[in-house]
Amino acid sequence: MKITALVENTSGGNLKAVHGLSFFIETEKHRLLFDLGPNKTIFENAKKKNIDLACVDTVIISHGHFDHGGALGEFMKINPNAKVYIQKTAFEPHYSKAGLLRINIGLDKSVMNNPNVVLLEGDFRIDEELSLFVSKVPDTFCSGANKALLAGRKPDDFRHEQNLLIKGEKDVLLTGCSHSGIVSIIESVTDAEPAYCIGGFHVYNPVSRKTVDEGQLRELSESLKKYGGIEFYTCHCTGNKAYRYLSERHGNIHYIACGDEIFI
């Protein structure tokens, strides 16, 4: 399996960095995209990496925020064949609070009726290699960065968030932002023991540009101690400050930036 970060907040090479997330994943059976980022950045970066997005057969949108699915409409223009799996509730209105303002961070609802879009309501097994699931364990961490996020006018409960489990010689878990809580997500995996976990921890607010306080970082760090057998590659909504804090305390927590590749 090969995982390439096509969209991420940071870049160590010639790829363009933007606030968002997208992974191109090559497995034995699939060429898939996990999230698409906010805009055309994915297409520019794919070209630089010599990745033909027309070969993609499967797209997973982790949740209903534009920085993960904003490029969906444009993608379907260049690839009319890939199946797109997304929770139905991801197309409901989503906002980020900034003072008294509500900033629209939702997806374009016009793509919902595309015949290749598969609207899900909970867990779904694509095949023996790919499974999607939602968190079923209450989030005891409750990141403070989630407080600014709304579903309509109510606090977001993140029922629109789904995660991907890839079965192989070593099982891989991919999350988008882990709004439901990274521990809750891992504990919701019942039929596998992931060797890798890739995705953000959402302890950084991109609007205020603030990381959760040290008390919450300490709490998150303590909760991750029980997963010493998992190699974590975090990114995006974790933020640099939190990554430094966690990686100094855990040798199994790494960063994956735009253009980086993981071979499993």
Image: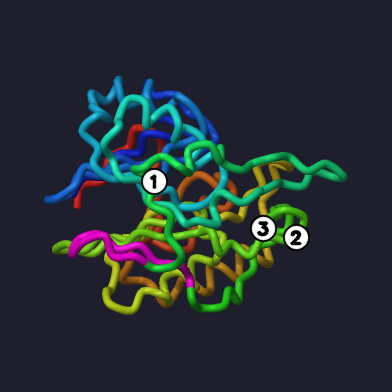
Which of the 4 image quarters holds residue 198?
Answer: bottom left
The local crowd at label 3, few if under 14, some if 14 to 19, many if 20 or more residues have their Cα within 10 Å, is many
Q: Residues within 10 Å of mark 2 (few under 14, many from 20)?
A: few
For the residue pair 140 and 138, the one nearer the viewer reads as: 138
Colouring method of the image:
rainbow
Element marked by disc 1: strand
Above or below: residue 157 compared with residue 41: below
CA distance separating discs 2 and 1: 27 Å
In the rendered structure, which amino acid carries the disc numbered 3?
Asn
Mark 2–mark 3 CB contact (< 8 Å): no
Res 154 label: 2
Q: Nearer the viewer, residue 73 or 141?
A: 73
* Residue 9 shows in this picture: no
Q: Name the residue beneath numbered marker 1.
A: 117
Residue on which the image places disc 3 = 146
Q: Which residues are magenta?
A: 124-135
**Three-letter amino acid code of the residue under disc 2:** Lys
- Of the image marks 2 and 1, the number of the one nearer the N terminus: 1
Task: Measure the alpha-carbon separation of dots 1 and 3.
Answer: 27 Å
SS under mark 2: strand
